[in-house]
Amino acid sequence: MLVFCSSIYLNSIDLIRRVNNLRQKNPHLSTLISIGGWSDGSTKYSQMVRSDSSRKVFIQSAIDFLTKHDLDGLDFDWEFPGFNGDEGGDRQLGRPEDKVDYVTLLRELRQAFAPHQFLLTAALTTAKYNMDHAYIVKEDWLCVAIIGASHWSEEDRMLTVQYTVDYFIQNGADPRKLIIGVPFYGYGYVSDQKPMVGANVVRSFDAGTYAHICLMVKHDTAWKVQFDNEAKASYVVNGGQLITYENAQSLEYKLNMIKSRNLGGAMIWEVNGDDHRGQCDAGKFPLLSKIMNTLN
């Protein structure tokens, strides 16, 4: 299974129509709308799930929207149950009952979606601390999107993709319903030490899409591509700057994990971050092509 993701704002209904029109080329294509995300905050979802009446309003509005726009389902990206936080601000421990009410909402959504044959997926967090406060893992999850990082301490190892997948499985999750998130973007860090994975960070920044990063490396020889064999992570360095990102080398390890653990597939955030023009000398859509060729 391969899930494509792209940002859609509510005033961009035309984009939904254009995505749906891709079914003319691929009649097996399913299109879902995603609600939530880090910048959407957490507190309002905590308020919504705590009563039967507010959950009912949410569920009916979801059905109405999916029906009106001829969509196939809903992806619920609450970041995160059991935590408070407005918009893109830091998360703080919140209402413990969220983890139970969250499962109740998912069950009610699935029951209400069944007559319409709508799909239901949920984007979940990595990190054992977050998972323990947010989820009842043994419940029947439908789909999990996981994005992780890797460092050296035991505490930090709990942030890795491998640890997260194994932790969900050990706690009763069906491997076939776990989907690993693959970032088509990078994140940058400025260090006061030698730039390397695990170095002290004094500032972070958004590094743009994979396409932006690969072109930057192609045209500026000051940027050097590196690979950390322990973290299985690709990054580029320039002076005191380090950008972590997904490239073909690091992507291969995630795809092998999907196959070796019999997971459900890969999720991409977001599809337009790939080198769709083939400007980096690896052909058009190099990351997407690698995923498709490996998993299919």
Image (cartoon, rainbow, N blue to C red):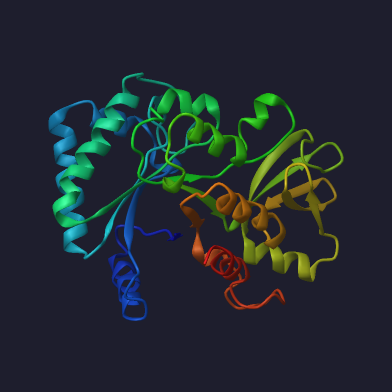
Q: Is residue 260 above or below residue 70?
A: above
Q: Residue furthest bottom?
A: 25
Q: Residue at x 57, y 69 (%)?
A: 293
Q: Is residue 29 above or below residue 265?
A: below
Q: Residue at x 45, y 41 (%)?
A: 38
The N terminus is located in which quarter?
Answer: bottom left
Q: Residue at x 74, y 35 (%)?
A: 201
Residue 244: x %, y % from top left: 70, 50
In this orientation, which residue lies closer to the viewer: 169 or 46? 169
Q: Is residue 161 left or right of residue 94?
A: right
> For residue 87, what is the image quadrant?
top left
In this orientation, which residue lies closer to the viewer: 37 or 154? 154
Q: Is residue 5 left or right of residue 50?
A: right
Q: Is residue 269 above or below residue 135?
A: below
Residue 108: x %, y % from top left: 20, 38
Residue 88: x %, y % from top left: 46, 38
> For residue 135, what is the image quadrant?
top left
Q: Is residue 185 left or right of residue 111?
A: right
Q: How many numbered marks have been drawn onto this rendered protein structure?
A: 0
Q: Residue at x 35, y 20 (%)?
A: 95
Residue 142: x %, y % from top left: 35, 44
Residue 91 shows in the view = no
In this orientation, which residue lies closer to the viewer: 170 or 255? 170
> For residue 199, what is the image quadrant?
top right
Residue 12 shows in the view = yes
Q: Is residue 102 left or right of residue 183?
A: left
